[in-house]
Image (spheres, helix red, strand yellow):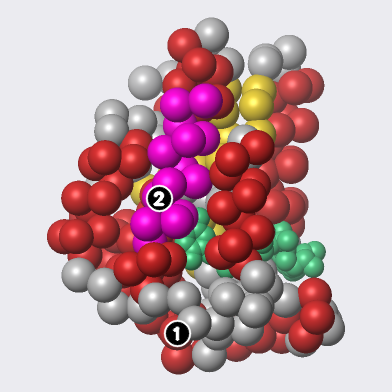
Amino acid sequence: MFITFEGIDFCGKSTQVELLKNYFERKGKSVQVIREPGGTEISEKIRDILLDKKNNKMFMETELLLFSASRAQLVREKINPFIKQGEIVISDRFHDSSTAYQGYGRGLPIDSVLNVHKLAIAERIPDITFIIDIPVEVAVKRKSEKTHQELDRIEVSSNDFFEKVRNGYLTLAKNEKRFRVIDGTQSIENIHKLIINYIEELEHL
Ligand code: ADP
Ligand code: TYD
């Protein structure tokens, strides 16, 4: 099973990824957690370039191709072999992040972004994708607990950008069956319970 988590920054993905990992481990299942961008030696180097606030001259085309390069490596070096071994893979972000951030957020043509995905991930589409949806104001509130220094190049983007990203995710969710949109303003425990319900549903299919 290949499970991905999506949503705007501070939506609570990492919290839920950890809880879901623990859930599978309690059930005695072998599970691998990865994060994007990153997850391999090469991909982590690309991550450093992408998130470095000094790289404020980066063009959106460069950004898309770097995220996709990091992902192409991760898919072939880790995700595909893990899935072949029968492991459950949970990824904190995957290709939908590029569609939402670089496509809907930055404004690159969506069909170009989807064509890049075809090369970068090929057939490796997630079985289920959770979008943890929160209003931008909630994200801003959570972000305010961090210092500017702690924020990366993308996290310092404008609220308007994050509105576009959020709406992009909601548009994506309407077009493909693998998406489950979850109201991320609920308690951490409630969100976790909803996720488990969806996973159990999928296991019984
Ligand atoms: P992400 O990985 O999406 O950036 P995190 O899981 O790191 O998000 O959560 C961002 C912040 O919001 C953290 O301080 C976390 O404790 C808090 N948080 C996560 N989920 C919730 C929730 N359901 N309600 C309130 N705060 C939350
Ligand atoms: P990260 O620190 O992993 O953020 P988060 O904990 O919110 O996932 O940084 C990843 C940042 O890169 C985040 O702001 C989202 C952005 N991003 C894209 O713009 N496009 C992508 O394809 C991916 C994977 C991430």
Q: Quadrant of ligand 1?
A: bottom right
Q: Tag count in the figure?
A: 2
Task: Return the mark for residue 77.
Answer: none
Name the residue beneath numbered marker 1.
161
Expressed as whole percent of the image width and height from the top left, the position of residue 152 reads: 67, 73
Expressed as whole percent of the image width and height from the top left, the position of residue 41 reads: 65, 37
Q: Nearer the viewer, residue 147 or 185?
A: 147
Determine if residue 133 is in view: yes
SS class, disc 2: helix
Name the residue beneath numbered marker 2.
68
Q: Nearer the viewer, residue 38 or 205?
A: 38
Find the residue positioned furthest to the left. 111
Which image quarter is the C terminus in? top left
Q: Is the CB–ligand 2 distance for label 2 below 8 Å? A: yes
Task: Write the start and end of the magenta stretch as one range.
Answer: 64-77
Amino acid type, mark 2: Ser
| Magenta stretch contains residue 75 | yes
Tell which circle, 1 or 2, labels the residue nearer the N-terminal end. 2
Left/right placement of residue 110 relative to residue 34 reads left
Residue at the location (20% across, 70% down)? Answer: 109
> Which is in the foreground here, disc 1 or disc 2?
2
Task: State how far apart marks 1 and 2 are (Cα).
Answer: 20 Å
Amino acid type, mark 1: Phe
